[in-house]
Image (cartoon, helix red, strand yellow):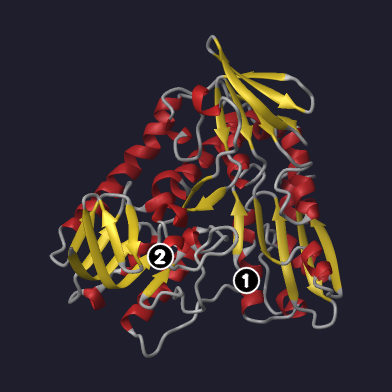
Amino acid sequence: MRSHDLIIIGSGSGNSIIGPEHDDMDVAIVERGLFGGTCLNVGCIPSKMLVYTAEIAELAAHVGPKLGIHTAFTGADWPAIRDRVFDRIDPIAAGGEQYRKGLDNVTVYQHDALFTGPKHIRVGTETIAADKIVIAAGARASIPPIDGLDAVGYHTSDTIMRLDEQPRRLAVLGGGYIAAELGNVFGMLGSEVTFIVRSDAMLRNEDEAISAAFTEAYQHKYDIRFMTGVSAVRRDGDDIVLDLFPSHEELRVDEILIATGRIPNGDQLDLAAHGFALDENGYLITDSHLRTNIDGVFALGDVTNPIQLKHVANHEAKVVRHNLAHPDSMIEVNHAAIPHAVFGHPQVASVGMTERDAITAGLDVTCHVQHYGSAAYGWAMEDTTSIVKLVMDSTSRHLLGAHICGPQASTLIQQLIQGMVFGQTVDQMATGQYYIHPALPEVIEQALLEL
């Protein structure tokens, strides 16, 4: 058995832990897949490169003609689109792997990790150990138990972006952010997309006004089957046939995208069998310093945090990096005001409480919805559907939450995040700074002033 000073499981955000302060340590990285983890290889980066491509197609097809521009969308070269993405990404993953392998103090194990004791890990045919371990093993797609699914084949976000051919007909199971983003990519590039959604709305965890606006926008573009499930799937020639319930309809498609959530990978490491504390959903439990209940073992990212966002994992990696190097002056993780965005068309961005959250918490709140079209730039865009919704504590006049559905939502929300983090009141945010006229951020100013 080989002993190391530090073992890191996962090369996503966990890979960023290693710095000059660890040059005198014998470090092991265990990575079973591509270096860079989910975000680089099968998540944020490739999907947003595809999202941007799809946005151009949508602008050409619908926005240009609306504004008197003779644009049109006449089809997509899917292999070229795919290759543009992965011809850039794959060398980055390979380069990261070669860089780590080239360091004298780092050993890379390209195997699954399986704990055989609290600090003993089997990798391939070897067992390794260390006093300090970081578990950054990520999460994976949750696959629903549908009869025949394995036999006919399906895709998740891990595989669908590398398809050889664009499907003519695509069924998307799910109504969350992965479904919304990737379904829209293929839809805007010309596939016939059908969403199969168990609930009555898209993005149902967003604020109700945002979910409603987004749902309406997608209903204008796509066939969405709400309150619907799949009882079985089967092959019929070249077709994949989905049996829907409760309608008893058949849906024929060429490919299936499963986007029904993600689950942490802690079970694949056999953590529970060796004393690690997990919550009821399988997430590895950590304290404010990101220590697990096993002395010397830290954890970060999707394996421990149901808020499965790259910017959260990156923040947690910085905390773990500091705490490994400074055990006598550890810092705490900061999970206040975590924003997120959905890169569909329209975009959605959110931070803090929804109106529903605030009312459930018993808070006295004031809410306001502002339409993009009330601002000069929104008017210039002829935008009649996009909205900003703010949720304010009526007593303190501090912003509890901000929610946007519309163009540039992921950018517009940043000034509201900053105001919340620095403790500004709504009045200070509205009047304590200039807003460039006639830029789109004026819709944020207007929303704040209305409160």
Residue drawn at x 49%, y 81% as measured from the top left: 332
Helix, strand or loop under label 1: loop
Amino acid identity at mark 1: Ala
**Which numbered dot is residue 274?**
2
Quadrant occupied by the C terminus? bottom right
Q: From the top left corner, tell me how far across and down residue 430 is, in percent.
A: 74, 74
Q: Is residue 268 left or right of residue 407?
A: left
Q: Is residue 283 left or right of residue 66?
A: left
Instruction: Looking at this view, name the residue that lies furthest to the top.
Output: 237
Q: From the top left corner, tell me how far across and down residue 413 is, in percent.
A: 64, 62
Residue drawn at x 53%, y 51% as measured from the top left: 263
Residue drawn at x 37%, y 90% as measured from the top left: 328
**Which numbered dot is residue 337?**
1
Q: From the top left corner, tell me how far across and down residue 273 is, in percent.
A: 43, 61
Residue 259, image quadrant: top right
Which of these two is toward me, 58 or 172? 172
Q: From the top left corner, tell me how far across and down residue 198 is, in percent.
A: 73, 39
- Circle 1 or circle 2, nearest the eye: 2
Whole-angstrom CA distance, mark 1 to mark 2, is 34 Å
Residue drawn at x 79%, y 24% as measured from the top left: 247
- Can residue 357 be seen here? The reply is yes
Q: In this picture, is 115 found above or below 251?
A: below
Instruction: Looking at this view, name the residue that lies furthest to the front.
Output: 273
Q: In this picture, is 88 found above or below 152?
A: below
Amino acid identity at mark 2: His
Quadrant occupied by the N terminus? bottom left
